[in-house]
Structures are given as C-alpha cells and as structure tokens.
Image (cartoon, helix red, strand yellow):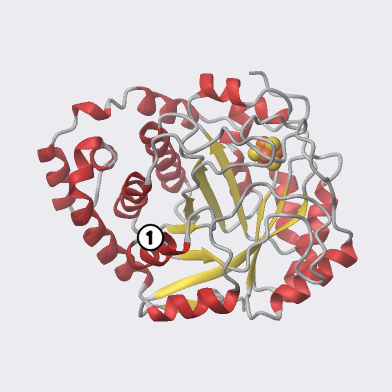
C-alpha cells in the first residue's frame, strides 16, 4: 500500500516491530503458570501482557479484575472522567464494509455549520460536561482541516478538554488543530492484520495502513498532549489485535514518555442497512479480559468505555479498569440543541443514559465523576 500524494512519511520501524510481535504471538502456547507469573510481577513485560490476553488467562478473570482495580485506584484514585462525543459531519470517502458511514451506504448525510456546532456545544456544555470529542466521517473534501479547526476553536469556548477523532492528518495539520484548542487525537487502527485490513477497507485513503498507523506519532509531533488507540474488536482475531494495540501504545510511550496514552475498547456494533455484522467471538468476559490486560500492562493509561456497551457492563467496568465514560451520546449529526437530527447514526448505541444519569451511576458505585482533570495556567 503506497502512500498517497501529500501523506507525510515518518522514518520509523515501529510498525514493523508491532506487526512482527503480533505475527509471532501464539496465544495458545501460554499456560496457567505464565498467567500466574504475569500477575505476580509488579511491572509487566510485553510477554506478560501476551499471557494475560491468552485463553489461559480467562479462568483468572477475577484475579485480573482485582489486580486491575488496584492499579486503577493507584493511578487514578476514585475519579471517572466524563465526556460526550459530538459528530459534526458524517460524509465519508472510505468504504469500510463494517461502518454505517461508509460511502456506499445510503444514509442521510449532513454537516453542521459553525452556528449549528456552536449551538450544539452550548447545549452540551449546559449539562455540566467540560470535555468533548469532535468526530467526523473521513472526508477531507466535506470536512477539511479548516472546518475541523474551526470546530475546535468553538469547542474551546465551552470545554476545557477537546479531543478529535477524525481522518489521519499530517503533523502540521494536527498542529493547526492543536493551536485551535485540541489536545487529544484518537485514531482506531481497526485491525492490525494488514491483509485483513485490505479486505475490509475497499476504497479511499484509509486503505493506506501505514499512514493510519503513524497518525498518533504525527499528532504528538503536532503538539498534541495525548493520543488514543484502538482495534475494533471482532473484525479479526481479537487477541492478536488487542496485543498489537497494546504494543503500539507501549512502543510509542517509550519513544514519547510525555505522551498521555489512552485506549478505547470498541466491539463491532450493528449498522443501518447491514444487520449481518456482529461482534465475532468477543463476548463480555473476553472484552473484560482485554480491558484488564491493558490496565495491568499500562496502568497509567486512560481507558474509555463507550456506549457501544450496555449500562450494566459500563457500570461494572468503571469499578475495575475504565477511567473515562461517555454520556448523553448521540452518534447522529445534530440533535442536541433542537432535537432535530440532520444526518443518520454511525451505529446503534447500547446505553442511552443522559449526563445526569451517568453522573449518578458513577456516584452510586462509590466513585467520583470528574468533568475535567487538567488545569491550564
Ligand atoms: S469507519 Fe470511519 S472511515 Fe470507515 S466508513 Fe466509517 S466513518 Fe468512514
């Protein structure tokens, strides 16, 4: 997959390291003893992380949850950060066969104007939230860098923490978003199996696997404070994908020690016009195993639990390992301020609770909802 014109190339062998580690990860060779010794270690090696993601670790889920909980409280106290995603556009030039926004899916497309973005953000900020994640489909034509930068500028008026989850960009473009108020960039690699990746991403710039892989590094070079990682669990072999996700974050953290690292743990969700796509093999115990393994391997990393998961699971996982939770989520375009949606949703959500309801649920677990954990001076 050749880089397309204009795509910045980073001189690094990190992708090769991650792919090699993933390809040689034979999770069936790990034993109970490997899992026990991983759990006994204070600081885990990649080999320990591999053991915790293996089938041999599944019977140790309770032990893993206990260890994860200790690490979470040690590094994050009782706090659970709250945020909401805001989709400002759903145009997309890519053909990802598992996503409701893909360019061939016949859905209502829309893009919010500056005034509409401001109105949505004002309404969201009135709920008390101080962190927002701005999302678009991946269309440079319909949502160019200036458009996203403008959304960041507006967001900064209403929120203390602004993140973006948009198409991968060059470092100077990330710098522009950063200058306009964004501090966090999340890019899902979807799957780290590059052969499978090609069969799932049939058209568009997203087909360029390495350009996507190095997005977090370009974001850090652009001045971002933190970067988020995820594989879409269920697209391919979830154990290998989770292992590669952890290795990607681990190696980037070694290279950029100041970077704030975050994990998301999305599972496939049903989408409009495609009811055949469902999570493959990733049931709740396996998902919890992955989340606990991330936590124990990289105890200081933020872990987000989204509304792809149900209320019960989300309430439980914030007690164990997740440190950030979304609330008042609408994955369509518009609808926060006047209830009128302009564009269709990316996927079906499982937890429709509003900000107050999630806030109370966090308190009921004996935890502290936190709207912003960062002070700019
Ligand atoms: S996953 Fe992202 S890039 Fe792919 S179709 Fe959906 S919005 Fe577009």
Q: Residue at position x 68%, y 55% from top?
A: 331
| Residue 373 appears in the rendering | no
* Picture quarter with ligand 1: top right
Q: Considering the image in quadrants, where does the C terminus appear?
A: bottom right
Residue 176 relative to residue 54: left or right: right
Q: Decide which of 33, 75 is in the foreground and name it.
A: 33
Q: Considering the image in quadrants, where does the N terminus appear?
A: top right
Q: Residue at position x 46%, y 29% from top?
A: 236
Q: Decide which of 182, 11 is in the foreground and name it.
A: 182
- Circle 1 sits on which residue? 300
Residue extending furthest left?
Answer: 33
Dividing the picture into quadrants, the one containing residue 108 is top right
Q: How many numbered circles are shown?
A: 1
Q: Residue at position x 55%, y 74% from top?
A: 374
Residue 63 relative to residue 256: left or right: left
- Picture layout, residue 136 above or below residue 75: above
Dividing the picture into quadrants, the one containing residue 69 is bottom left
| Disc 1 element | loop
């Amino acid at each position: 997959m050749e880089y397309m014109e204009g795509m910045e190339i980073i001189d690094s062998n990190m992708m090769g390291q991650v792919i090699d580690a993933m390809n040689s990860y034979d999770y069936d060779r790990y034993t109970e003893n490997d899992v026990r010794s991983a759990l006994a270690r204070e600081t885990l090696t990649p080999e320990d992380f591999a053991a915790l993601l293996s089938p041999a670790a599944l019977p140790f889920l309770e032990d893993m949850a206990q260890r994860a909980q200790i690490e979470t409280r040690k590094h994050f106290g009782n706090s659970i950060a709250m945020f909401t995603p805001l989709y400002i556009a759903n145009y997309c030039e890519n053909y990802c066969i598992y996503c409701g926004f893909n360019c061939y899916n016949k859905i209502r497309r829309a893009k919010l104007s500056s005034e509409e973005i401001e109105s949505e953000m004002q309404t969201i900020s009135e709920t008390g939230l101080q962190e927002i994640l701005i999302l678009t489909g991946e269309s440079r034509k319909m949502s160019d860098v200036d458009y996203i930068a403008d959304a960041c500028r507006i967001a900064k008026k209403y929120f203390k923490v602004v993140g973006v989850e948009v198409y991968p960009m060059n470092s100077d473009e990330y710098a522009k978003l950063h200058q306009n108020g964004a501090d966090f960039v999340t890019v899902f690699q979807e799957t780290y199996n590059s052969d499978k990746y090609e069969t799932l991403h049939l058209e568009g710039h997203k087909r360029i696997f390495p350009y996507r892989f190095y997005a977090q590094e370009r974001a850090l070079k652009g001045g971002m404070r933190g970067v988020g990682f995820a594989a879409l669990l269920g697209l391919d072999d979830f154990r290998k994908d989770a292992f590669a996700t952890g290795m990607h974050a681990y190696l980037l953290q070694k290279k950029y020690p100041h970077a704030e690292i975050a994990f998301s743990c999305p599972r496939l969700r049903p989408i409009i016009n495609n009811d055949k796509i469902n999570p493959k093999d990733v049931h709740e115990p396996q998902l919890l195993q992955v989340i606990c393994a991330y936590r124990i391997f990289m105890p200081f990393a933020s872990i987000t639990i989204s509304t792809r998961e149900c209320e019960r699971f989300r309430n439980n996982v914030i007690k164990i390992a997740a440190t950030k939770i979304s609330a008042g989520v609408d994955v369509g375009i518009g609808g926060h301020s006047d209830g009128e949606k302009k564009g269709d949703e990316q996927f079906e959500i499982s937890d429709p609770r509003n900000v107050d309801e999630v806030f109370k649920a966090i308190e009921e677990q004996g935890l502290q909802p936190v709207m912003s954990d960062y002070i700019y001076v």
